[in-house]
Image: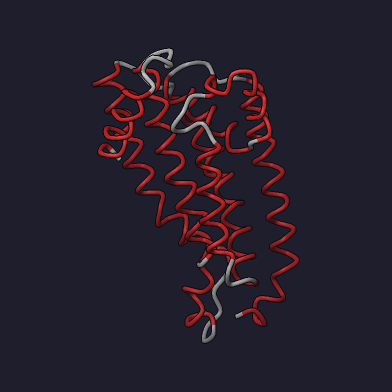
Amino acid sequence: MLITVGSVGLLFGTILRRQLNGFEEYVNALASGLVMWTFLSAVASDSSIAFARWMPILRHSTISFSVIALSVLLRHLPVLALNIVVLFALQFVVLGLTPSPLGMLAALALLIVNVSWICVLSMVLGARFRDVGQLVTSAMQISFLLTPVLWPPYFLGRYEFLLLFNPFYYQLSVFNAAAAGVEVPVFHLVTTAGLAAGGSALAFVLYRWSRDRWPYWI
C-alpha cells in the first residue's frame, strides 16, 4: 500500500500539480481512497467465486451460508486493519493530519455493512452463474476509474454533479473525510447509511429466495 500510494501519488501528483488545489490534500485522499477500494474490490471479487471454491466441501457436508460469507470477510479484514494503520501513520508523520476517531468508526461500520451486502449479492449470483466472477472484476475496474480515487471530484468541473449517480462516491467521501479528520458531509453520510440499509434488505430478500435452490446450483 505504501509503495502504491507513493508511486501513484508522485506520478499523478507531478502530472496534475498545476490543477490540484493542494498536493498534500490529494495524497491524503488518494491514500484513504486506495485503502477503501482495495478492501471493497477484493471482497466483491472473492465472494463471486466463493461457492465455486467451497463446492467440493458443500457436496459432502452442510455448511451455513453465513459461514462462507464470514470466511470471505475475515480473509480481508486483517488486510484492511493493517492498511488503516499504515494510512494513519502516513497521515500523522508525513501530512500532519489526525483522523477523527468517531467519524472513522462510523465510516468503517458503514463500509463493512455495505461490503457485506455486496458480498452476499456476489455470492448468490456467483453460485447461480459461474461467469459472474469475471463480470464483477470488470465492473469493479470500470467503477474504480469512474470514482474519484485517482483524481479529485472538482476535476469534473460543471459535470461534478454526475458523481451523485455513483453510489461508491458517497462511501468514498465519508471515508476520506473521516480519515482526514474533517467534518463528514451530512448528505453523503445519510446516503451511505441509506445504501447500507437498502442494500442489506435487498441482499436478505435474495438470500431467502435462493436458499432452497443452492443444492441444485452446486
Q: Measured from the top left, where is residue 66 in percent x and y?
A: 56, 63
Q: Is residue 120 left or right of residue 176?
A: right
Q: Measured from the top left, where is residue 52 in percent x and y?
A: 51, 74
Q: Measured from the top left, where is residue 108 in percent x and y?
A: 49, 36
Q: Between 64 and 147, which is closer to the camera in this rendering?
A: 147
Which corner quadrant of the image does residue 101 belong to?
Answer: top left
**Does any portion of residue 102 appear in the rendered image?**
no
Q: How many marks?
A: 0
Q: Between 17 and 38, which is closer to the camera in this rendering?
A: 17
As drawn, 156 above or below 21 = below
The quarter of the rendered structure image containing the N terminus is top left
The quarter of the rendered structure image containing the C terminus is bottom right
Task: State how the image is colored.
Answer: secondary structure
Q: Residue at x 42, y 26 (%)?
A: 29
Q: Between 191 and 4, which is closer to the camera in this rendering?
A: 4
Q: Residue at x 48, y 82 (%)?
A: 56
Q: Between 34 and 60, which is closer to the camera in this rendering?
A: 34
**Does any portion of residue 208 appear in the rendered image?**
yes
Q: Residue at x 43, y 18 (%)?
A: 181
Q: Is residue 16 left or right of residue 90?
A: right
As drawn, 169 above or below 208 = above
Extreme residue toward the bottom, this view:
60
Q: Residue at x 67, y 24 (%)?
A: 161
